[in-house]
Amino acid sequence: MSNSALVNLATVGSDELQAMPISAFTAGLEQMSAEGIVRFRRLRKLSGPQRSALEKFLVEHPDKRPGGGGGEPGAPARHADEEGEKNKKKKSREAGIGWEILLRVIAWWEGMETDDVARAKGIKRRQKRKVAPPATARNQAAPAAAPAAAPEPPISMSRLEIIQKLWGPGFSLPGGADFALLVAERASLKSKGRFLDLAPGLGGGMRAVATKHGITILGIEADAEVAAEALRLATEQGMGETAPVRACGPEGLKPADFEPAEGHAAIFMRESMFAVDDRETMLAEINHGLAESGSLILTDFILATGIGVDTEEAPALAAWRMAEGGSAAPWTEAEYRRALEAQNYKLESFEDLTLAYLPLIQSGWRQLHDCLQKAKLLPETATTLMEEGAVWLARCQALETKQLRLVLIHATRTSTGSGANAEADFASEDADEANG
């Protein structure tokens, strides 16, 4: 398991912990302090094999026991230093804004110093520049010390509040209103048409598009908590009728969600198709819901050509799959093109937005960093921040390898068939005509 995956045993879900391979479990223990292991052992329910693995680990790593005792005096520390130097040579890199935030939160959680966490993970922290005081200030007598200010109480933020600290009020994805408008404007935005967003999140992008173009957009969101907040925000802004959001059913999107058939001028979907199990059926249902020449506007993560076939996957890509909960199975550009053609879409454009998208992620981290620079977090807030941060750091690192890309796809419906079977029939008839 890669350290860069930022898998923290103290924050993984109970089901994920129980299903975790022993090798991954042991690798997670290696990243924890002695105090962190004590806390983890006290609070989490372990399986029999995991308890045995933990006991074996503590025997083999006496420096991880409470107090760090055991073994020849000085030996564990020397061994840890040697391993730390090896790891540093292998993967040392400078911490960005996102890493700085997570390093501080992990250090607080584990009861360690931030520099110690950084060394354990092979991260080189940025050095703060010291500014010399002006000469006049140096020559003046030091003023009387001001009374110490009362310490700020720890703050609590919900998952939705953390998301909005990253991406802005009402938004749950990078780029805010400007990026949402850029994506949507590939479609023909006419006020008389119906519009549908299948991944609206908190609805900020929908509302920006509806406001600018004077249209009505319905959002259907997979996360019920997010959908409820999106509807509240829309209603609060007087857009409950023009940009409403509702939750989809517990089993996901259904054919009825795409009704009326052939009735939508455009259907939008951002950064979520890569996790859909049956993408061919999804594309068929979207096609069924689009009007003739209606637009599918899709942003998604794809694999670069040859990854996993001609070129081995980078560790950051494997870490990203893990951070996404194992649901990430991105297509390549060629696979997308074939799937769209099979469903009788006309591909209008296929744009690589990776270079524009990465700075948007980093901008979100700076916003959160400014908010939390001096703040103390409650335990539940720290846990939520680590979970949300781990996903976005993994996405960012995978995109930086150039093996993963963020693309914008614009395709239009070219046939009037209904359903996946009708689409297949049209494709078969076209093939027969071509062959004479």
Image: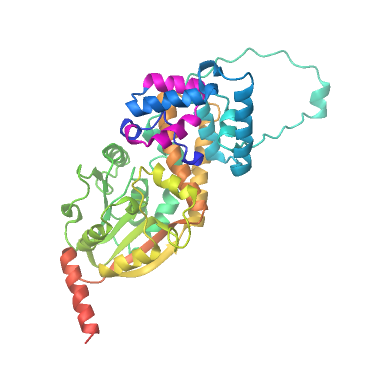
Q: Nearer the viewer, residue 390 or 14?
A: 14
The residue segment tinted magenta is 18-43
The answer to whether any part of residue 97 appears in the image is: yes
Q: Is residue 136 above or below residue 129?
A: above
Q: Quadrant of residue 267?
A: bottom left
Q: Main secondary structure of the magenta part?
A: helix
Q: Nearer the viewer, residue 38 or 195?
A: 38
Which residue sits at x=45%, y=59%?
307
In the figure, is residue 347 to the left or right of 436?
Answer: right
Q: Quadrant of residue 116?
A: top right
Q: Residue furthest bottom?
A: 436
In the figure, is residue 255 to the left or right of 11?
Answer: left
Q: Quadrant of residue 183?
A: bottom left
Q: Is residue 6 above or below residue 313?
A: above
Quadrant containing the C terminus in the rendered view: bottom left
In x, y percent, where is residue 398?
48, 50
In x, y percent, where is residue 207?
34, 48
Q: Is residue 156 above or below residue 66?
A: below
In x, y percent, where is residue 32?
49, 28
Q: Nearer the viewer, residue 384 or 70?
A: 70
Residue 146 colored in magenta in the image? no
Which residue sits at x=61%, y=41%?
92
Q: How is the image coloured?
A: rainbow
Q: Residue furthest front?
A: 72
In x, y percent, where is residue 163?
41, 38
